[in-house]
Amino acid sequence: MSEVLDNLRILKPVHGGYGLAFIDGATVFVAGAIAGERLSAQVIRRKGRVVWARACAIDEASPDRRDHVWPQAERSGVGGADLGHVSLAGGRRWKAAVIADALERLGSRELADEAGPVMVHAAPGDAERDGLGWRTRVEFTVDERGLAGMHVPGSQRVVALTDMPLASPDIAELGLLGGDSPWRSRWKPGQRIRAWGGYIRIDRTWHDAAGEVVADPILSVTAGEDTYEVRADDFWQAHREGAGVLHEAVARAVAGRGDASVAELYCGSGLFTRVLARESAAVFAVEGAGGACAQARANTADQGNVEVRQARVDRRFVEDEIIARRPGLVVMDPPRTGAGRETTRALARAGAERIVLIACDPAALARDAQVLLEAGYHITQLDGFDLFPYTHHVECVGVFDRARSGAV
Ligand SMILES: C[S@@+](CC[C@H](N)C(=O)[O-])C[C@H]1O[C@@H](n2cnc3c(N)ncnc32)[C@H](O)[C@@H]1O
């Protein structure tokens, strides 16, 4: 029987989907908890004075608590819905608190004050669907019996799934889960499976829904008034409304500016590039992945004022290629780790009036935003978007200006 900690009081939510508690000089990160609750938790792991535990009996429940949206995940501990026990509105409050906490702890008091209270907005349609059926791409691992499942975080254990309520209906229709799955004869234990847009990738090979091999599937997706062709292997927002929500947020942040020169870093397949090309005279868009670069070029081919460059964005690249262009506006959507101190500092030296930073990790947001603050930028607007309901993940869009100005 593993150790149980009783009478824990959860002080606040922390990054990664845990509630924070202290007991007997130890810091405890509790999964399945909500701020304000008093509960008992089973110890999962200890490292010095830090303990990871899972709530097992709730003595005083938060009003934000709900029946878990995915009972199999709650029972087995598989990842993918670590806030499945929190109401949708409670989840957005949770994420707003985590963003504010990151801004202060990893940035500064000044940064948190400039940002003010952060709102996390729901994606269209989530309230009607109770926050389910949003995930358009899902990854599974095949267990030793040949069943599609997911890992328990921090372990090698794969739990075969019977359902995945966060997945969009087209994924459920592929019939990947359970012992009757027609796909079982096609994959082997240990293989990674990815599903997106009616295609299934087994290890590196894509198949259509009928099981035929497809070399390099390209999907047609829309966001706002724009349509994009995206390779199944490249980045695209996972939430069914995610690309549309961010397309609109970026359009709002750049509306009416009419910049002569715009730099877009980490442009992917060109989701924001089309918006920027409509609003400005010339866009220099940069992306590291060759396939996404080709799609960004194809997706903006009708616009005529876009140059897409395949390059790795780092301090050197910014110094060599961005600063001399003197962009009036920079838009950047780096990977989860953020642009990083060196790159962001160099970027600030390009002197853009406005920088729009899209970030999918509050810690990376706080680090990059602090660099911008130190370089003389101010936060004009910062919004969170709940593009990952029932998980701890959240997307943020920050608008930073050299001169102080009103909200966009
Ligand atoms: C979060 S995605 C954003 C893509 C696009 N804005 C979108 O929303 O579809 C980040 C992109 O940055 C690219 N990337 C990651 N690290 C990079 C680097 N150091 N230099 C250039 N591109 C990079 C990835 O290939 C990916 O396409």
Image (cartoon, rainbow, N blue to C red):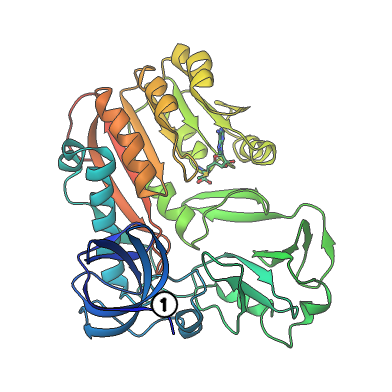
Instruction: Look at the image and tell me in which quarter the N terminus lies.
Output: bottom left
| Mark 1: secondary structure | loop
Residue 388, picture quadrant: bottom left
Note whether residue 345 is visible: yes
Residue sitting at x 42%, y 25%: 342
> Nearest the camera: 274 or 31?
31
Instruction: Look at the image and tell me in which quarter the C terminus lies.
Output: top left
Residue sitting at x 77%, y 52%: 216
Return the residue found at the far bottom.
Answer: 180
Q: Which residue does the numbered mark 1 point to in the structure image? A: 129
> Nearest the camera: 192 or 389?
192
Q: Is mark 1 within 8 Å of ligand 1?
A: no
Q: Horizontally, is 323 left or right of 116 in the view?
A: right
The amino acid type found where label 1 is placed reads Arg
Answer above or below: position of 211 versus 329: below
Q: Horizontally, is 47 left or right of 33 in the view?
A: right
Q: Position of residue 256 (x, y in %)?
A: 32, 33
Dot 1, how many residues are within 10 Å of its Cα: few (below 14), some (14-19), or many (20+)? few
